[in-house]
Amino acid sequence: MPGICQNLKIISSELAPAGVKLVAVSKLQPEKSILEAYHCGQKTFGENRVQELLPKAGALPKDIEWHLIGHLQTNKVKFIAPFISLIHSVDSLNLLKEIDKEVKKNSRIIPCLLQIRIAREETKFGMKFDKAKELFDSCELQNYQNIKISGLMGMATQTEDQTLVRSEFRSLHKFYSELKHKHNLSILSMGMSGDYKIAVEEGSNMVRIGSSIFNIS
């Protein structure tokens, strides 16, 4: 079985021609494995849970770019506001309000992605297209000076049906394209270990990959 460095080399070679950024999903990974990936050149890591992210961010190299990719509760925002580089999973105006408030205390501006629900599973978080459009057009959004909505994130249905997965990614890319210039968006985060190749073909420029890097079966 290839090691972490070899996996990173293979995946990076696939992503580089299209200019796609790789977020190494390090949830449940020990610090040793994250450091191995770091020393192989990977500097961007994504965590799902704040309580797992905090000790890792405290112990690992300070030049790591940490992304919060899982569902974020408003009462956890204050813990990551001082250092988080990108929040992928914003799914409400209320959460944006809380992020802005806490980030302001740290004199920062944090880029955020709106999470759009494109999958059929009811367990997936995210906003519907119409609600996201309403948020972009809301007057209240203009009051938040310490956040920047930089793009969109979505997760496809977990299925072997690649036609369905492709159609879901395609729908999100279409929505992104409609909003991109009006709202100065630059990031479309879609694609994980099982479907990132399809996501890239459908326009993703940021992928979140864990199991294919860290050899999780």
Image (cartoon, rainbow, N blue to C red):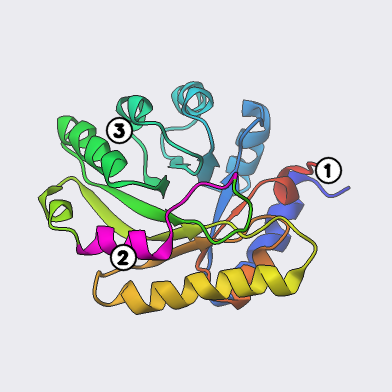
Asked if the stretch drawn in magenta spans residue 56, the answer is no
Stretch in magenta: 123-137
Q: Which quarter of the rendered picture does the C terminus lie within?
A: top right
- Residue type at mark 2 is Lys
- Residue type at mark 3 is Ala
* Image-based side of 50 in relation to 181, left or right: right
* Image-based side of 96 in relation to 159, left or right: left
- Residue type at mark 1 is Ser
- Quick check: 20 above or below 22? below
Where is residue 58 drawn, in percent x and y? 44, 23
Q: CA distance from mark 2 to mark 1?
A: 38 Å
Q: What residue did someone put label 3 on?
A: 81
Q: Image quarter for residue 38?
A: top right
Label 3, residues with CA under 10 Å away: few <14, some 14-19, many ≥20: many
* Image-based side of 82 in relation to 187, left or right: left
Residue drawn at (89%, 47%) of the image: 1
Q: Main secondary structure of the magenta part?
A: helix
Asked if the stretch drawn in magenta spans residue 127, the answer is yes
Q: Is residue 185 visible?
A: yes
N-term mark: 3 or 1: 3
Residue drawn at (68%, 34%) of the image: 33
Q: In this orientation, which residue lies closer to the viewer: 170 or 133?
A: 133
* Image-based side of 139 in relation to 77, left or right: left
Task: Report helix, strand or loop for mark 1.
Answer: loop
Where is residue 113 drawn, in percent x and y? 38, 54
Task: Report helix, strand or loop for mark 3.
Answer: loop
Q: Image quarter for residue 11?
A: bottom right
Q: What residue did someone put label 2 on?
A: 133
Where is residue 160 drawn, in percent x and y? 80, 63
Q: What residue did someone put label 1 on?
A: 217
